[in-house]
Amino acid sequence: MGLFRRAASEVTPLTGRDVLLADLDGVVYAGPGALPYAIDSLNQAAENVRLGYITNNASRTDASVAEHLTELGLTVKPDEVVTSPQAAMRLLAGIVPAPATILIVGGEGLVVEAEKAGYTVTRSAEDAPAAVVQGFAPHVAWTDLAEAAFALQLPEEEGGIPWISTNTDWTIPRERGVAPGNGTLVSAVHTAIGRLSTVAGKPETPIFEEALARFGAQNALFLGDRLDTDIMGADRAGIDSALVLTGIDRPKHVLAAPQGSRPTYILSDLRELHEPYPQTREKDGVFTVGGASVRVVNADVQILAAGDSQINLLRAGAAAIWATGLAIYAFRVPEALYADPFHKP
């Protein structure tokens, strides 16, 4: 039985969708444990729409991710998980065909996908690799980063080899808090060699293109917790998006979101996938969502009515600020607008 009943006329974020694509870290789980309401809400969604999972985390295989999600209470097959290593191999195939030798910085998830694609894997620059592919794993050490730097010392325009990173997320949510992500490790190599990697994962489009093709999606919705990777990537791929406030980005980040990183929906948690999503109404510069109303006058963001829902106040405030076309730093914003009672990892 579903968590909510709704009339056919009530429009939710899932209305009319054929595929729901969800990020994992900060959306479904933080570390090994599920986030509140995520499993029940996704299982309810699966009654009416196909589910797929997209992750920038390159440390695990699609099979291990599917097993983990199934242990948490979902029903997931490996081919319903799209990983950044898969996107990296798709990208690499057009640059360096298999069975070339490639230097891997990362974990099992990246090694397995490289071998499935027909590549020979090495961990040493002394094996004259034809490319370097770098992804996150908790055990990546200085020695791994050094091997990548040795292999990439010659700039690509001078005959150096390609460098692909699975993703450049600066942080990753864990059960104990926020930890450094793959972007931090990629940046260390970049600092050493002065080169930039080509990115396969979010916010770049290869990982979304892989997902859309695999699921045959015509009207997908993507769930994420980060504006700079999830929401920006979905926007670039032409996919509607929902930002859920259970992971990295907080209300203050939503208010400051630049064009191209603004979600279609803003959700407290995944239960709101199944609730009617309130329309944003504008009249004479006043933006109203539910009982909350906000306007911008000169440099002041003004709350005219707080309503009885912090999420609707945030939605109204974001709409008012975004409509100005100006960065949030130009305004005085009342603290009540970016209050953060929402679940954080």
Image: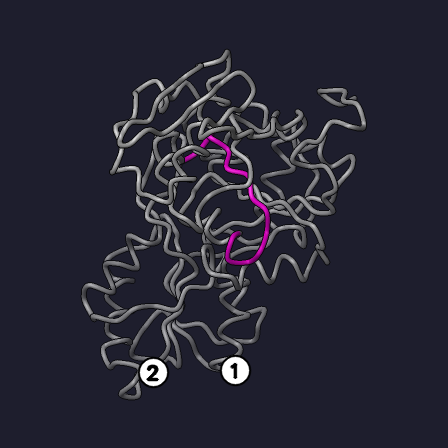
What percent of the width, then of the height, locates residue 8?
A: 81, 28
Residue at the spot 25% in from the left edge and 28% down from the top edge: 332
Q: Does the CB distance between marks 1 and 2 fall below 8 Å?
A: no
**Marker disc for residue 97:** 1
Whether residue 275 sits left or right of residue 301 in the image: it is right
Q: Is residue 149 above or below residue 183?
A: below
Q: Amino acid at mark 2?
A: Ala
* Element on which disc 2 rests: loop
Q: Tell me the SS state at disc 1.
A: loop
Query: The magenta stretch spans which residues?
Result: 235-249
Look at 25% across and 38% down and name the residue there: 329
Magenta-colored stretch includes residue 243? yes
The front one of 345 and 222 is 222
Q: Quadrant of the C terminus?
A: top left
Q: From this viewpoint, which residue is outermost toward the bottom?
A: 159
Position of the N terminus by quadrant:
top right
Q: Which residue is mark 2?
A: 128
Mark 2 neighbour density, 10 Å: few (under 14) some (14–19) many (20 or more): few
Disc 1 from disc 2: Cα separation: 15 Å
Q: Nearer the viewer, residue 273 or 309?
A: 309
Residue 73 inside the magenta-drawn segment? no
Is 35 situated above or below 50?
above
Front residue of 54/104: it is: 54
